[in-house]
Image (spheres, rainbow, N blue to C red):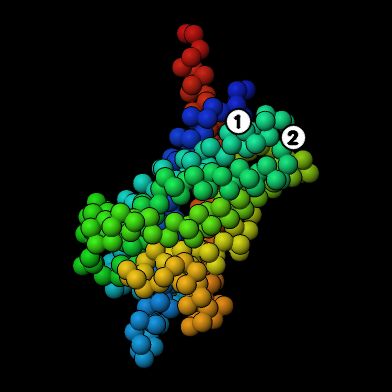
Amino acid sequence: MVGFGPVDMPPTATVKFLGAGTAACIADLFTFPLDTAKVRLQIQGEVKAAAGDVKVTRYHGVFGTITTMVRTEGPRSLYKGLVAGLQRQMSFASVRIGLYDSVKQFYTKGSEHVGIGSRLLAGCTTGAMAVAVAQPTDVVKVRFQAQASNTGRYQSTMHAYRTIAREEGIRGLWKGTGPNIARNAIVNCTELVTYDLIKDALLKATPLTDDLPCHFTSAFGAGFCTTIIASPVDVVKTRYMNSAHGQYRSALNCALTMLTKEGPTAFYKGFMPSFLRLGSWNVVMFVTYEQLKRAMMMARHNWAAPL
């Protein structure tokens, strides 16, 4: 047995809620440079279009982007927006992942048989709920990551919240909520449902037990499937959130502008960093989440047990 073994009592909703947020923050600490590289690649065509006739491609590939950023902006640039990113995960992942099982049980009315429809519905529900809670943190994170200069307009996380609210109104902090809800409904459904299904299949059809190797394999597969399905919406979300006030009339207008000016391949810009980030993020998050749930339940049991 690798790591903490399964405990007799299932984890409580509170344990899942806190464990999901903590595990997501740990995963972000490991994978944030890949996320920043993904954002830079996704907005690159937008920057070129704004430059007019100047056709300069600044970033080339995942590791080329990271190398260029370190060379021109310093290594700290890879972690721009980390504070907002951690705020986002603590509020966002706690809801979309931590409440997933509870919402799934609500839709199945406690039945042991859980169909794929109930899983998808639960994923959509918690994904949309999470965006409603955490959207401002996502906007600030994307703005920081897209900021190419060390002397950019946002000096700190709180300064970014205040500046966006002052210049664009409170609605500016909720910019891109529509595409973000769409993205996270897709991501949540694909990520959590795929993880659920792969894990169930591995436990039934292979010698693997409910342990680290099973969690690792399930998480990696979930990350790959999620990247393929969610990339187009993710690119539109990033472009729209980072756009100047009035640049796009709506998220749909942003998508149509991309299609017209850059072609359909624009929707998969930053695919490799997206996959590297989502794949590695899923592995770190799910493995940590499973272990945290067990560790917290063991600690709770030991605390409650008489001496």
Q: Quadrant of residue 240?
A: bottom left
Whether 245 is drawn above or below 119: the answer is below
Q: Under tag 1, what secondary structure?
A: loop
**Disc 1 and disc 2 in contact, CB within 8 angstroms:** no
Is residue 148 rendered to the left or right of residue 241? left
Q: Residue 208: x, y in percent?
A: 71, 41
Q: Under tag 2, what secondary structure?
A: loop
Bin the neighbour count of mark 1 within 10 Å (Cα to Cα): few under 14, some 14-19, many 20 and up.
some
Whether 74 is drawn above or below 128: the answer is below
Q: Which mark is residue 113?
A: 2
Q: Residue 210: x, y in percent?
A: 66, 37
Residue at (48, 14) in percent of width and height: 304
Whether 304 is drawn above or below 120: the answer is above
Could you tell me which quadrant the N terminus lies in? top right
Bin the neighbour count of mark 2 within 10 Å (Cα to Cα): few under 14, some 14-19, many 20 and up.
few
Q: Residue 175: x, y in percent?
A: 38, 59
- Residue type, numbered disc 2: His
Decide which of 232, 22 is in the foreground and name it: 232
- Residue type, numbered disc 1: Gly
Q: Residue 32: x, y in percent?
A: 41, 57
Q: Which residue is mark 1?
A: 5
Residue at (48, 29) in percent of width and height: 14
Number of residue marks: 2
Q: Earlier in the sequence, mark 1 or mark 2?
A: 1
Is residue 15 rendered to the left or right of residue 191? left
Q: Is residue 42 visible?
A: no
Disc nearest the viewer among 1 and 2: 2
